[in-house]
Amino acid sequence: MDLILKPVRVATSKPARQTYLNAILFMITSSILFGLAVFAYILLYYNYVPQIGIERVIHLQYGDGPHPYGVTSLDTSLISQQVYDIALILHVPRSPPNLRQGNFMLSLSLLSPTYKPLPSTTDASTLTPTNGPTLALAREDILFSSRRPALLTYTSRLVSLSERLLALPLYILGLKHESEILHIPMAESASFPRGRKNIPGFAMLELQAGQEVQVYAVKITFKARFGGLRWLMYNYRIISFVIFTAAFWIAEVLFAAIGWLVVSAVFSTGGDVKREVNGEEMDGSVVGVKKEGEESDGPELSDTPRTFPTYGRQAPLRYVSTGKDEPQVKDEDSEEYAALERGGLAEADDEDEDDGEEVGGYRGGRTDSGI
């Protein structure tokens, strides 16, 4: 039976229970730290890797100047020290005014976050020559500017007529429109210096083609060109997630283990010191009690051996100090006790003889009876 229960006793022993508890605590702590590592990587990714594509709609204003223009907010989408390709997307109809327009210029200006529209009466010396009278801008508000030409695709009259005849059912059903989408690159590998004031907060576009130009919609796009660690984290997301999460988790476990060891050492040292102090206090209290008891008792007895008389023919008791708290009384079986007993008996016989002589002497000694 003991052989059968031996594995159970081993499995339920105190060291085994302590091992189970440590394993459970390690698993729980590791799980919590792994969740924190995942959260840390997600936070790092969204703060370090920007949006690869940013798109904003620009609503053009007509009738406020010689050219239509529009301003849009970029919010905080752009980041510093990141390369961007900037482009404009124009959806324009193939109308006769646009076809007659030919080439026209697009002027793009990226403005600082502190930009505020200036009144039209601003001094001409503070205006940029490319903006003209359409919108007054201060020089310190312009962080980046670019001008690029645009032109509708040319098609001859015969090709255009043939294409329309062949696609006539699509035009009737509304599946095709007589319009064109223009993609005009405005900047390549544009970047902004470090600093909140150096990151554009607004974008202003001006179509320098007069008020006759016709436009359906205008959009501005920013496409980030990643390099180095950002390129690796964006193009290999799973591998980056595994590597960085494992690195964060290992670092957290190491620091947690170091902290646990430090805390354990501090608490164990404090417990030992407390136990030592408590032991010293208890010893001092016991000694103090003894001293108080000794002072309250009668006079101290010396260590000199003493002999105490007894009744009858019993041997006297002899006290011998051994240096301990309790006195020691000689045992009856000891040799010293036997010797004392023999001496006592001899002394008793001598006393009896002396008593007989004294009695005879008192009576006058021998007398003749006359017999």
Image (spheres, rainbow, N blue to C red):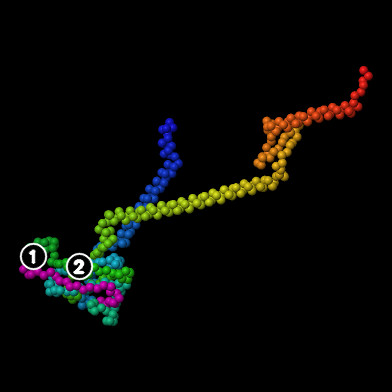
Can you say which quadrant of the picture contains the N terminus? top left
Farthest top residue?
371
Write down the region rendered in magenta.
135-163
Residue depicted at 9% across the width and 61% down the height: 169
Residue depicted at 46% across the width and 53% down the height: 263
Can you say which quadrant of the picture contains the C terminus? top right
Location of mark 1 (residue): 163
Give percent across and percent down for residue 128.
Answer: 25, 78
In magenta stretch: residue 162: yes
Q: Is residue 144 above or below residue 251?
A: below
Give percent across and percent down for residue 252.
Answer: 38, 54
Give percent across and percent down for residue 92.
Answer: 16, 69
Query: Dot 2: few (<14), some (14–19), or many (≥20) neighbours within 10 Å?
Result: some
In magenta stretch: residue 268: no
Q: Secondary structure at mark 1?
A: helix
Query: Dot 1: few (<14), some (14–19), or many (≥20) neighbours within 10 Å?
Result: few
Report whether 339 appears left or right of 68: right
The amino acid type, in three-letter code, at marker 1 is: Glu
Displayed quadrant of residue 216 = bottom left
Q: Which mark is residue 89?
A: 2
The amino acid type, in three-letter code, at marker 2 is: Ile
Q: Is residue 337 above or below residue 289?
A: above
Q: Earlier in the sequence, mark 1 or mark 2?
A: 2
Answer yes or no: is residue 193 visible: yes
User: Looking at the image, which is closer to me, 231 or 51?
Assistant: 231
Numbered disc in front, either 1 or 2: 2
Report whether 297 appears left or right of 78: right
Residue depicted at 30% across the width and 72% down the height: 112
